[in-house]
Amino acid sequence: MSSALPIAAANPAAILGHGTQTSVLIAFLCFVGASLLLCVFAGPDRDEVDDFYTANRTLTPLQNGLALSGDYISAATMLGTTGIIALSGFDGIMLDVSTALALGTLLVLARPLRNAGRYTLGDIFALRAPGPAARIAAAVATLAVSLPFLVVQLSGAGAATALLLGLTSSGAQQTCIALIGTLMVFYTVLGGMKGTSLMQIVKVVLVIGTMATTTLYVLSQFHWSPDELLTAAARGSGHPATYLRSTSQLGVTASGPLNIIGLHITVVLGAACMPHMIMRINAVPDGATARRSTRYAFGMVGIYSIALAVLGMGAAAMVGARVISAVNPNGQASLLLLAGSLAGGPETTSGSILFTAVACTVFVTVLAVVAGITLAAAASLAHDVHAHVLRRGRIGQAQEVRAVRWAVLLFGLVGILVSVAAQGYNVQFLSMLAVTVAASAVLPAVVHSLFWRGYNRTGLLWSVYGGAALAIGLQLVSPTVSGGPGTLFPDLNFAWSPLQSAGIVSIPAGFLLGWAGSRHGSRRQDAAAEVDQDAVELRVLTGAGAD
């Protein structure tokens, strides 16, 4: 089956009929109203820190596993990975596999993270390095990861929502960004961890159900034959000879295989170490439950990744790379275009229902993920900076909950303003930047804090600030930011580094900086002398004293 949509489909009005746009708008409004009610009724009963940050750790392994997979499944993967598979084939499928395997990193760390952690990243950093410096470093790392990732989600959500409603102007997209961001703030302020958890659970059920149904539709178009689907996808991609082998179609420029390896290592090590994922681990009673939750999440994400691969190839086969690239050069409209071409098109009843379901899935994915990101960032500002640095721990629970709600407003406002200002620019590199910072700054500090007795304040600061600075610096001078089409600055060229993913350098550097800084700090007898290392190891192994 070759490309079924004409080039006119690049116009959103040609993709969606008026009836479908009306159905999508009604579905959006119904979901917004229902989700706000859910957050109000499921939100914290009292102004208590445990309730707001961890839902009093009352989630079952299955509930938290579903919520954890909901935190992990983002609009960036749903739209971006599908598009990469449609346009690039093998390289996109390998990225999809790496995205699923990243939860293996969290599976290894889940039990000690829950045993040692309490609420935020700062509680883990303070294990071996008590004092305000570790708390500030945790807040800096959290914001350095969360803000870029939030901007990518909001920017993509604004463009996708405007497309679904048949709007194409910049002002319409900016308005959609502002509205989605405002909803995000309301959900987080009203719901806390309990409300956002319920949203994540609803989201995962909707995502898995819709993606599975759409996958079955695609396979039915090719007589349930994977071979026929692969052949049609290769033909529709425009490069059938290379579609099913690695040809650096991800945009890698200078060093080919080295860049591909670096990309996959960064995704596997960084994607599951985002601060909002680590905070989610603390929403269960103990380390064993945290590991069971992660296993459930691994299964959900595995099913989701298989569906992404089928849908990406289905988009290449049924829509065609030429049409997908005409709508968006990065392929982010491929899933919506595919949904519009299935079941007789959006003008038929079945096609309209399917398209509306996919549209609502994208919408709920965005809202749920940005709420989780915002909660983690606000919690770090309120718990680490306000409560422990500025107030030195002398703060009541109700005061801290008020502080975190104000922090939600602040972080949400900054995210909305940056996303609106970035509208019209290609900010997709920020997604890789966030993952790279997580792998280069957060992961080394977490691993050292959990497993190395010799880790101290100097090592922590070197690994967090050094790893983050190296990751950001190398990413900014990489080919993903300037020097070519599809970059943030296509007309400028300051791509002095040949590495598309800085992680292959910055991740080992983060670990080495933590080791070197700890050796240097041990000679100065810094904060490590104040730490009872036996008590820390007991806490990591058993959870004793964590709460």
Image (tube, rainbow, N blue to C red):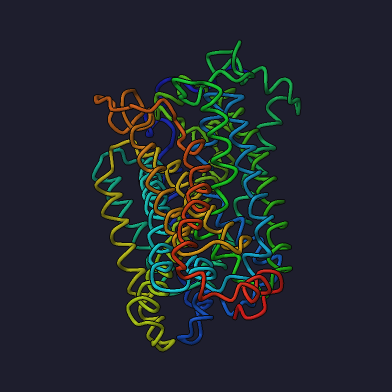
Q: Residue at 40% x, 38% y: name it.
A: 428
Tell me the quadrant of the picture where the N terminus can be found. top right
Quarter of the image holding residue 406?
Answer: bottom left
Query: Hey, which residue is sitting farthest top in the picture?
Result: 241
Quarter of the image holding residue 215?
Answer: top right
Where does residue 41 sit, x and y in percent of width and height?
51, 78
Viewed as shown, does residue 35 lie left or right of 487? right
Quarter of the image holding residue 493?
Answer: top left
Is any part of residue 440 visible from this angle?
A: yes
In the displayed structure, 89 sits above or below 527; it is above
Tell me the quadrant of the picture where the C terminus can be found. bottom right
Q: Residue at 55% x, 48% y: name it.
A: 271
Q: How many marks?
A: 0
Where does residue 494 sit, x and y in percent of width and height?
28, 27
Where does residue 137 sit, x and y in percent of width and height?
40, 62
Instruction: Please name whichever residue, 307 or 274, is drawn nearer the observer in this view of the structure.
Output: 274
Instruction: Please name whichever residue, 446 or 157, is drawn nearer the observer in this view of the structure.
Output: 446
Viewed as shown, does residue 65 lie left or right of 392? right
Instruction: Please name whichever residue, 526 or 395, is drawn nearer the observer in this view of the structure.
Output: 526
